[in-house]
Structure formats: structure tokens, C-alpha cells
Amino acid sequence: MWLLVVGLEPAALVWLPVWLGGAVLVDDLVIVPVVFLVGWVLNRRLGGSAALGFVRTGLLYGGLTSLIAIALLLRQGKGANPTVLPRDYVRDWFLLEATIALSAVIAYRLHRRRRGPRPDGQ
């Protein structure tokens, strides 16, 4: 705590609670309802299907990697130091998310192939 107080300028210390409060509001008023809506739609569309587990797992990993990457994605603004952040993190994040989605699709396809044809012809 002491390092936070002595390491930040007074103006930054004033904006810190505002930023944290905004993060809580965005989480509670935007992210949580969107997650519940996506979950509800997925359950209505894929309920009882083996694909639901693969979609949920892909979304979980995508969300976790996005949560970890958000600091780098937001920091890469105009004032970013190119020696500290030399990579294009937005492009890399998109590639990571695409890789996660493709992995979920491949895993589902392998699961269906390994399981064989279903008795009801599907």
C-alpha cells in the first residue's frame, strides 16, 4: 500500500478510486448481463448437445486470456513507450482468440469422429 501512495502522483491517487468504481460498474452493468445473455442463448440453442461443453470451454479460455491481456491492450495507446511495448498486442490478441476458437472446433470434431455415428442418424 505504501508503494502505491508514494509511487503515484496526487492526481493519479484521486482518479484511482474513480477508475476502480468505473470498473465495478462496467462489470456489473455490462459484462455480467452480456455473459448471462450469451449463456442463456447457448443453452437454448445447444442444450443437451455435446457441442455446448466445447463452446463453453472455448468461451471460458477466450474470456480468461482477454482478462489477462486487457492491461496490455489498453496501455498500447498513443503515449505508449515503443521500447516497453514493441509488439502489436491487439493483433496478437486476435490471433490468440482465433486460435482458441479453432482449437475448440477441432476438439469438437475429433470428439464427434471418435464417438462414431449416433443411432438416430445424426
Image: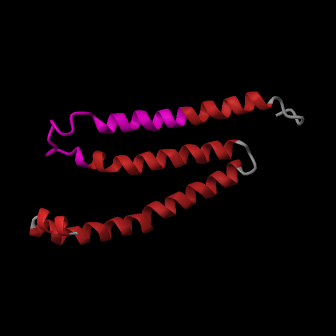
Q: What is the quadrant of residue 6 in the picture? A: bottom left
Q: What residue do we see at 76% from left, 29% from top? A: 114
* Left or right for 72, reference 56: left
* Left or right for 56, reference 118: left
Provide residue 27's location: percent of width, then percent of height: 41, 64
For the C terminus, give its image quadrant. Answer: top right
What span is colored magenta in the figure? Answer: 75-102
* Left or right for 16, reference 114: left
Q: Is 81 in front, or is 38?
A: 81
The residue lying furthest to the front in this view is 2
Residue 64 within the segment the image draws in magenta:
no
Provide residue 33's location: percent of width, then percent of height: 50, 63
- On the question of residue 73 being in view, the answer is yes
For the N terminus, give its image quadrant. Answer: bottom left
Colour scheme of the rendered structure: secondary structure
Q: Is 52 in front, or is 107?
A: 107
Q: What is the quadrant of residue 76 in the picture? A: top left
Provide residue 102's location: percent of width, then percent of height: 54, 32
Q: What residue do we see at 56% from left, 43% from top? A: 58
For the image, the number of numbered tags is: 0
* Left or right for 121, reference 103: right
Q: What residue do we see at 18% from left, 39% from top? A: 84
Residue 84 within the segment the image draws in magenta:
yes
Question: In the rendered image of this protein, does residue 35 appear above or below residue 98?
Answer: below
Question: In the rendered image of this protein, does residue 117 appear above or below residue 78?
Answer: above
Q: What residue do we see at 47% from left, 49% from top? A: 63
Q: What is the quadrant of residue 22 in the picture? A: bottom left
- On the question of residue 8 being in view, the answer is no
Question: In the rendered image of this protein, does residue 99 appear above or below residue 44?
Answer: above
Provide residue 74's location: percent of width, then percent of height: 27, 49
Q: Is 72 in front, or is 1?
A: 1
